[in-house]
Amino acid sequence: MRRNRVVIKIGHLAARSGEKVMGSIGVPETTIKLPVTLINGNKAGKTVLITGGVHNAEYTGIETAIRLADEIQPDEISGCLILIHPVNTSGFEKRTMSVVAEDGKNLNRIFPGNPNGTEGDKLCHFLATAVLSQIDFYIDLHAGDGYENLTPYVYYLGAAAPEVVEQSKVMAQKVNVRYLVKSFTTTGGVYNYAGSCGIPSILIERGGQGRWSEEEVKLYKADVKNVLRHLAVLEGTVNANEYEQVEIENVIYENASVNGCWYPYKKAGEMIKKGEELGVIKDYFGKVLQSCSAKYDGLILYQVSSLCILKNEAMVVYGEVEN
Ligand SMILES: [Zn+2]
């Protein structure tokens, strides 16, 4: 499918075979303008979507998408690349955490949106109808949010058609991180929704805490390029993974039951033992409001790093290491 594409088009932007086109696309019935790059290769092949900034303060993913859009040229490509950098522009420009500035909604919870809803709903509807409808594969670039510390890992689809799950897993294996997480959510997220449409997809987590560095972006770009080579969209040979990858299973989100001050005792990427205390929430007077203990031996994928913790938010997220 979708071979020998003469022209790729989103909104008013169009790239003919051998062209790269960059520009802002207005989301219908909103004030949102999406920065998009279309790269239409000289040769036939698949179409891949790369997004950064579905969560607007996850800067490593955003900067990686910006760099890839700048660096990759049509003569290196077989097929097409669509890059959106970032997706949540209004959140980026207001420096919110996680949410669209106009309506306070998290784009990764409301997919596929609604053409008659709020700004975020309309943005999701536009992505679902005008973008996801055109793609064969999807790579979503995330990081820890401004208040989250994580160890690099990659999600792949677990609740899609068997061949989609398998293709997603092989894509994840080309990402140079130690940990793989199979995700079973089917609704709400952009990447999960893509899976329900039969599009093999991965979501990479690298960096966080409102920071980014040249070193992280270099690693992140190498991850994406390696997946693109595996998909035969980018020329060049696929690099072997330097890690012996393991799956993280039975992932637990330990939620805060109160607002307060959060004192984690561990770090992302640390191994934990069943029963070990992972952190406490205290009030402003130092009184302990909640204590969090590990339910089993495992590995911490990410945790809140801000002093502020919010009720119903995950304080710490961990899972069991396979075998
Ligand atoms: Zn995210």
Image: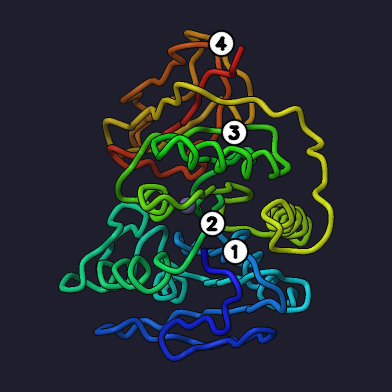
Of marks 4 and 2, which one's residue comes earlier in the chain?
2
Of marks 1 and 3, which one's residue comes earlier in the chain?
1
Q: Amino acid at mark 4?
A: Lys
Tell me if residue 228 comes above or below residue 25 in the rendering. Answer: above
Read off the residue under disc 3.
180
Q: Secondary structure at mark 1?
A: strand
Q: Give how far across and how far down residue 155 sits, in percent.
A: 53, 40
Of residues 156 and 54, the one drawn nearer to the viewer in this rendering: 156
> Which residue does the image show at 50% across and 8% down from the upper left?
274
**Separation of disc 1 and disc 3 at Cα?**
24 Å
Q: Quadrant of residue 315?
A: top left
Tell me if residue 11 comes above or below residue 95 in the rendering. Answer: below
Circle number at residue 188: none
Read off the residue under disc 1.
46
**Separation of disc 2 and disc 1 at Cα?**
8 Å
11 sits to left or right of 117: right
Read off the residue under disc 4.
273
Of marks 1 and 4, which one's residue comes earlier in the chain?
1
Q: Quadrant of the C terminus?
A: top right
Tags 1 and 4 touching, CB below 8 Å = no
Q: Amino acid at mark 2?
A: Phe
Of marks 2 and 1, which one's residue comes earlier in the chain?
1
